[in-house]
Amino acid sequence: IPANAIREFTWNIFAAHYIEMVKPRAYGLIDGKEGACYTLHKCLATILLLSAPIIPFITDHLWRELYSNKSIHLEQFPKAEWDKEFAKYTNDIIEFNSLVWNEKKSNGKSLKDPIEITIPDNLTIFKDDLIAMHNII
């Protein structure tokens, strides 16, 4: 069911992992603010476009507030864009984030507390983001 797939992606991947990971960039705490903000808006616009046939009124309202004075229903439906280079990391990032969050929880720490943990070799491309996200020391 498309509505379930959109919801699953929006809440359990985009919000829970991607937004959390780029917060330090988006807030300008580490380099890459412009790119992070662009990607956040690109994702939100795509989520709105995909959701428009299912929840037409709120998506149209948000679209007009954020992106255009024209109705979202006049826009082209988005075409799939898949970057295989980075898509392969999705599950590994989710697993690492879950590991860190569970480790902090089991030790009675808040998510903002520092943690000493090793970033897996396959995720070193995201090292700066993961360090900032999890307060890794």
Image: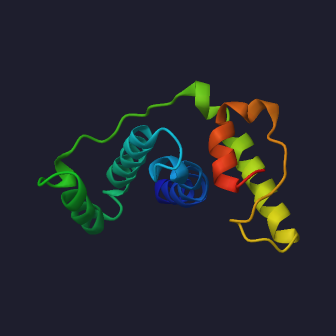
For residue 109, above or below residue 91: below
Q: Residue at x 28, y 68 (%)?
A: 58
Q: Residue furthest left?
A: 69
Q: Quadrant of residue 88?
A: top right
Q: As drawn, is 124 to the left or to the right of 59?
A: right
Q: Residue at x 52, y 53 (%)?
A: 23
For residue 100, above or below residue 55: above
| Front one among 48 and 129 | 129
Residue 133 picture location, percent across and down: 64, 53
| Front one among 5 and 61 | 61
Residue 130 picture location, percent across and down: 68, 46
For residue 15, above or below residue 82: below
Residue 31 picture location, percent across and down: 50, 39
For residue 71, above or below residue 126: below
Q: As drawn, is 127 to the left or to the right of 7?
A: right
| Front one among 16 and 116 | 116
The image's colour scheme reads rainbow
Q: Residue at x 72, y 32 (%)?
A: 124
